[in-house]
Amino acid sequence: MQADRFIPFRKQDIIEMCSSELANKFDLESFHQFSELLSSYIHFNYHGILESLKNDYAPFDPNADTRLLNALSDAQKRQCQQSFASNFANVLNAANYEKITEQDLQDALTEESLFKVRLEVEFEDFEQVVFYRRGESQKSETLRSFFGLRKQVIEFTNYDRVAVFITLKSAAHFSKKNKAPIGFEPGSTIIKLFQNVPKADLEMLFPNSEVKMRRIDKILIGASAAVGGSVVLATKLGPSIILLAALFGFWLGLKDNPVEITKQHLFTLGMGFGVLGGFVFKEWSKFKNRKIKFMKALSDSLYFKNLDNNAGVFHTLIDSAEEEDVKEALLAYTFLLKNPDGMNATELDTTIETWFEQTHKCKLDFEVEDALDKLDRMDLVNKKVDVDSNEVYVAKPLKEAKQQLDEKWDNIFNYNING
């Protein structure tokens, strides 16, 4: 399985891990000051992204409790939607989420669910559907059947985090279908964040998924109905069927003797139809109860898997993306600082990935290009070219790096006070 870009340690833990690497050669208090400056500067940059996301999402937020000052035209709404989708995708990428492919979604619809539930999704209701995931692992689970007598261990692919971005079609689409989406406004954009989702159960995350009976469930209910119906037919409906056969035979001219219907006959017919109606209602109730059982299993699962919804999702993802950026920059700067001669991108990437695997028993795919790009933009490294024409990065000393960040922080707002 391909290594994940996500760094599965908290920012504070990474600071302590990097401090341990620098303990014998550098002033740790100075390094902690550098870490604080770096975190604050990146945090402010993400604040602007968060405000942009909030403004672009406001016209489509199904949970909004505020009013729009001015109604937006269709062109303005499309512009907001495009801007939001672009920024949201960038945030997910910064948080080291991977886009789930169309093939993965199709596989989820065809593979058997771990919850033994078949779901159907009407994809034509959606204007846009994008799924992202972070953290992929192989897990196993024991499924029990036949009252616990049979046990089956199955292995499946599990996603630690799944972000869902869905835009519903306009009201005109649902008006043509004569069916409105339950719990959602047409044209709204739905964003959800889940945890521990099996790949085979991705379809349960769609807002319009409907529980359907599997073939085996239909066979079981059908077999039960057939057996029960035979018993009812033989024991309860026999006299009624004989009487009806005699009546139809006389009416069709198959019998010459008229059938005399007495009160006893009418009572027998009434009892027969009553038993038949009761049997049909009983089997229909079985079907509905089994479907309700499946829906409860689905809702229980989603209750514990759901982490956040709509505007709350990008608040959570902004925080995650910010932490990933800080962790990547800190790791790259730390290992460049340890090597005063500098390293090229490949050397730095290998060094950090090996360090994680050997020291912390963690295999990951470090985003070295992204980390170096951040250090370069913040002017925390110098660059030179080695004999093989590779670009080599050299970390600026801690004191100079702190001064550089402090200067950037001081000049975030550079207003003319006298103006």
Image: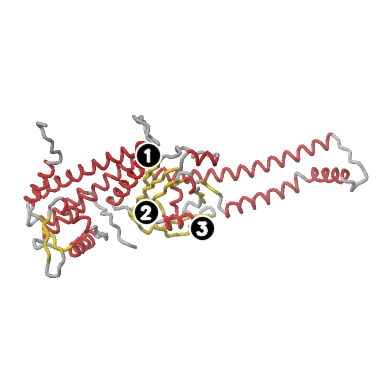
Disc 1 marks which residue? 77
Task: Tell me whether the residue at label 3 lies in contact with that at label 1, contact meaning CB atoms closer than 8 angstroms.
Answer: no
Disc 3 marks which residue? 150
Disc 2 marks which residue? 159
* Residue 192 image position (x, y, % from top left): 38, 44
The Cα atoms of the two marked residues, 2 and 3, are separated by: 27 Å
Please report whichever mark, 2 or 1, sits nearer to the chain's N-terminal start. 1
Judged from the image, the secondary structure of the residue bearing numbered disc 3 is strand
Q: Does residue 33 appear left or right of residue 231 in this picture?
A: left
Judged from the image, the secondary structure of the residue bearing numbered disc 1 is helix
Judged from the image, the secondary structure of the residue bearing numbered disc 2 is strand
* Residue 98 image position (x, y, % from top left): 33, 54
Q: Is residue 349 above or below residue 130?
A: below
Which quadrant of the structure image shows residue 159?
bottom left
Label 1 amino acid? Lys
Please report whichever mark, 2 or 3, sits nearer to the chain's N-terminal start. 3
Q: Is residue 131 above or below residue 309?
A: below
Label 2 amino acid? Tyr
Residue neighbourhood size for the residue with mark 1, other residues' Cα within 10 Å, grouped as few (<14), some (14–19), many (≥20)? some
The Cα atoms of the two marked residues, 2 and 1, are separated by: 33 Å
Q: Which one is closest to the eye, mark 2 or mark 3?
A: 2
Residue neighbourhood size for the residue with mark 2, other residues' Cα within 10 Å, grouped as few (<14), some (14–19), many (≥20)? many
Q: Does residue 379 appear left or right of residue 231 in this picture?
A: left
